[in-house]
Image (spheres, rainbow, N blue to C red):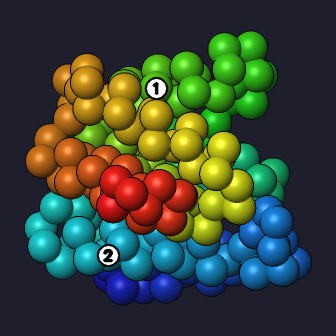
Amino acid sequence: MTDSTLISRAAAFAARAHAGQTRRGSDTPYYTHVEAVARRVQELCEQGQADPAMVAAAYLHDTMEDCGTTHDELTALFGSDIADLVAELTNDDEKKHRMGKETYMVDKLSHLTPRALTVKLCDTLSNISDCPTPTQAATYASIQRRLQAAPPATWNNTHAQLSSAIIKAYEYRFDPQKA
């Protein structure tokens, strides 16, 4: 299977899985979010900072969490590498509730593999761009500031750039005096 076929199949699967879903607080189809995340990862792929499996995982990143897709299903359709990436990106809602969103996300991001961290930061950048409330956006920015203060062992220049872009997006949208 070629890389473009793999990515096209992942895009089609995500479109079907998210059919009828909308972004929180709007009537925008949810698929536009996964498409935006995949597009950003594709740009990194073209710069040699990502790979096609990461682009496919970007399309699929919310299918386990939001659509009931299983790891076994993703493995059968896309292989274990992509299924494992998607599983790594999937939040544990019980743990997030118990720890609190910000603490959970800092811990989660600190333990992701470099590839998963890249996809997750692209996801966060898309989320903060569409974030409906200043409180949610401030949480995303706070998470990034905490990561920048104590970068994970897997942190690299791409991660630092994406993290800075997330904070700048927050400042531009919700704190214009800092932008």
Q: In this view, does 165 lie above or below 46?
A: above
Q: Position of residue 20 (x, y in %)?
A: 87, 78
Question: Which residue: 45% across, 43% down?
Answer: 141
Circle 2 packing at 10 Å, graded few (<14), some (14-19), many (20+), is many
The residue where tag 1 is placed is: 106
The residue closer to the viewer here, 84 or 172, is 172
Circle 2: element type: helix
In the image: residue 126, left or right of residue 157: right
Residue at x-position 54% and y-position 78% = 35
| Nearer-the-camera pick, 73 or 147 | 147
Residue 117 placement (x, y as % from top left): 36, 43
Question: Of circles 2 and 1, which is in front?
Answer: 1
The front one of 154 and 130 is: 130
Quadrant in the picture for the N terminus: bottom left
Q: Nearer the viewer, residue 141 or 81?
A: 141
Is 66 positioned to the left or the right of 161 in the image? right
**What residue would you read off at disc 2?**
42
Q: Picture coordinates of residue 63 (x, y %)?
A: 69, 58
Q: Residue 141 carries which label?
A: none
Q: Is residue 70 visible?
A: no
Secondary structure of the residue carrying tag 1 is: helix
Q: Which of marks 2 and 1 is nearer the N terminus?
A: 2
Q: In which quarter of the image is the C terminus?
A: bottom left
Q: Residue lying at the far front in this picture: please name it.
A: 177
Q: Which amino acid does label 2 sit on?
A: Gln
Q: How far apart are marks 2 and 1 (CA)?
A: 25 Å
Q: Can residue 46 be seen in this view?
A: yes
Give how far across and how far down residue 113 sits, in percent: 32, 35
**Residue at point 12%, 67% (across, down):** 48
Amino acid, disc 1: Val
Left or right: 81 as drawn, with respect to 161? right
